[in-house]
Amino acid sequence: MNGPGLFTAHVPGTSVVHRMPLWLKLVGVLVVGATPWFAQSVWPLAVTTVVLVGVVLAARLPARRLVRSMRGLLPVLVVLLAFQWWSRDLAYAVRVVLGIVNAFVAAGILTATTPVTDLLDGVVRAARPLRRVVDPEVVALTLGVVVRSVPWVAGSFSSVRESARARGLDRNPRAVVVPTVVHVVAFARSTGEALAARGLTDPADDDAPGPDGPGASSRSAG
């Protein structure tokens, strides 16, 4: 993928952030995400931003990853800042934007400093108390597909855009959107076929009617 960001892949390391247990990182992400709901001014959010920058430095994450991650979010932040400033006031608009930035960076730190296998294992452990409602393995599989798909789709869009730019068609939305959609559909089909080949898409149904009608398996067994 051209221009990797915080969410694209795990960054191996031995820093204190990498060695933190998963539950502590998750608690940190939740605290950062909840801060805007309790902050009455910009300062708590600004302090949180400084702390997150310090965590990025402590984890020795490449600065270019943080910059590239924020670059894609910047247009949305600008529009949101302008709208909140117009509808409320500047202080409130800054609080909203800082809250989003902090949550985004905190989640990026989590994914960049934690191997995907550890994340999936954590999801399975968290879902075990709900095994009567959901299958923990299916939940982990779903999350794994999402984690794999998001950077792939972003990389496909980047590659198509670069190709269109080389042909002088970067300002033509059709030249970028159509090939990207074709790639995404092909990726989705290949992923679905791979899951089906492993029997992970349709649960086995022992009572399903066979070619000789319902209960044929039971009669043959008898």
Image (tube, helix red, strand yellow):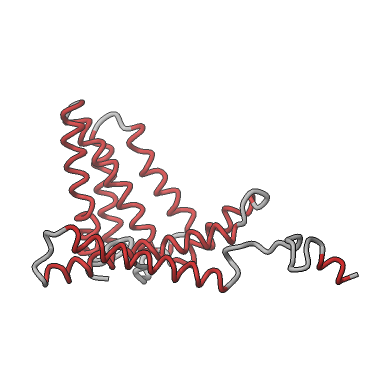
Which residue shows up at 32% across the image and 64% down it?
A: 153
Relative to residue 155, is residue 75 depicted above or below? above
Q: Quadrant of residue 168?
A: bottom left
Q: Quadrant of the C terminus?
A: bottom right
**Residue 16 visible at all:** no
How many marks on residues?
0
Seen at 37% across and 68% down, the residue is 10
Q: Position of residue 214 (x, y in %)?
A: 79, 61
> x, y percentage for residue 15?
36, 66
Name which quarter of the figure residue 188 lies in: bottom left
Q: Is residue 130 left or right of residue 28?
A: right
Q: Quadrant of the N terminus?
A: bottom left
Q: How far across and down, in percent of the image, does residue 190 sit?
A: 44, 71
User: In the depicted view, which residue is nearer to us: 61 or 168?
Assistant: 168
| Rendered location of residue 178, percent (x, y) | 25, 62
At 28% from the left and 64% from the top, the residue drawn is 180
Looking at the image, is 98 positioned above or below residue 196? above
Nearest the eye: 68 or 17: 68
